[in-house]
Amino acid sequence: MFNMKDKVSVIIPTYNRKEELLRAINSVLEQTYNYYEIIVVDDNSNFSVKDFLIKYLSESFRIIRNERNLGPSSSRNIGVNNATGVLVAFLDSDDYWDKEKLKKQIQLFNNDPSIGLIYCDQWIVDNKNNIIPSRKKIITDNLWDNLLNWWTSPNTSTLMFRKDVFISLGGFDNRLMNCEDHDLWMNVAKNNIIFKGINEQLSYFNQSNSERLTFDYKRRFDGVKKFLSKWKGDIINSKGIMHFLWFKNIYKLNAALPIFMILLRKRQFKNALIVFVKNLLCNPFFYSHVFKSFINLVKV
């Protein structure tokens, strides 16, 4: 049984998306839990998202348009600042949800009022539109140590916060155009927020869209640099300088390798070469992992 106070504000940031945005919205409208509002934050798209979604507009479905392109962190924060629910859930406009997602997360919130964050596992939609398990480890404790030993969470579309907890953390870091989700998890750990994970795939992470912001190599690397600079002191104080250097190399590798492979697949060889040279010179892990990736491609 759910409490009527458990209204969920679903925050959907979007930029220049249409059909994928409709799929995301419809996955919310099909939820088995229906006490929610939808807030679409249009990050200054090149068309009128409001006109595109005119038939959806209602008291529980609002569209906010940014006067300029601010990025996903600011857009999500703007959505939360305009939310009326006690819970907030994030859904990227190219992702979508299982119909039971909200219901199963709210059940956990109702069972334990001390919980500030609940996340779930996800399906991966690859570049051939195959749907495969994420193979993510769902953890429920020792968050700081797990993060510093390279645990990575499912993506932002799996998250549901108590609104007051999210605001107390300062939300997403507006300075980060990338790595903002990992940064938020670091804040969750540092502030000892109680969290739970659902070991069930209730969200679909769309990696079939190579135009996703994550694959913008210049923005991606800028985000990685800012993230590592921000957390360098905390990591060194916690684990020492050698651990930070290891963490930095792994972080750079996991940012660069997918972008490198995508640029090759899109035949953007000049940009691929830039990524290759920059990482080959400064990251000892990069070369060996590129070689392994090519071997795997040959085997396929």
Image: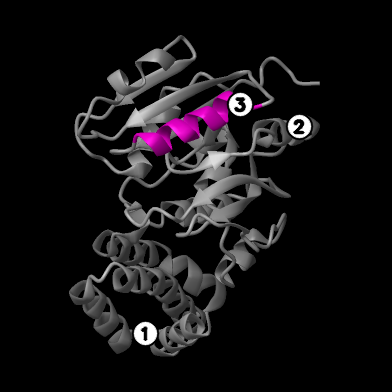
Q: Earlier in the sequence, mark 1 or mark 3?
A: 3
Percent across and percent down for residue 17 are 33, 38
Percent across and percent down for residue 35 are 63, 18
Main secondary-structure element of the magenta-colored stretch: helix
Is the image coloured rainbow, by chain, by secondary structure, or in one colour?
A: one colour
User: Are the residues tagged 1 and 3 within 8 Å (C-beta)?
Assistant: no
Whether the magenta-drawn stretch holds residue 30 is answered as yes
Neighbour class for label 2 at 10 Å: few (<14), some, many (≥20)? few
- Would you say 278 lies left or right of 240 here? left
Three-letter code, disc 3: Glu
Q: Earlier in the sequence, mark 2 or mark 3?
A: 3
Which residue is pictured at 53% across the width and 40% down the height? 96
Which residue is pictured at 61% across the width and 60% down the height? 134
Residue nearest the observer in this picture, 83 or 186: 83
Q: Is disc 1 placed on a helix, strand or loop?
A: loop
**Residue carrying label 2:** 107
Instruction: Name the quadrant containing residue 165.
Output: top right
Neighbour class for label 1 at 10 Å: few (<14), some, many (≥20)? some
Three-letter code, disc 2: Gln
Q: Earlier in the sequence, mark 2 or mark 1?
A: 2
Task: Tell me which segment is drawn in magenta.
Answer: 18-31
Q: Is residue 183 above or below residue 79?
A: below
- Cα distance, mark 1 to mark 3? 45 Å
Q: Is disc 3 placed on a helix, strand or loop?
A: loop
- Cα distance, mark 2 to mark 3? 18 Å
Q: Nearer the viewer, mark 2 or mark 3?
A: 3
Disc ID at residue 283: 1
**Residue carrying label 3:** 30
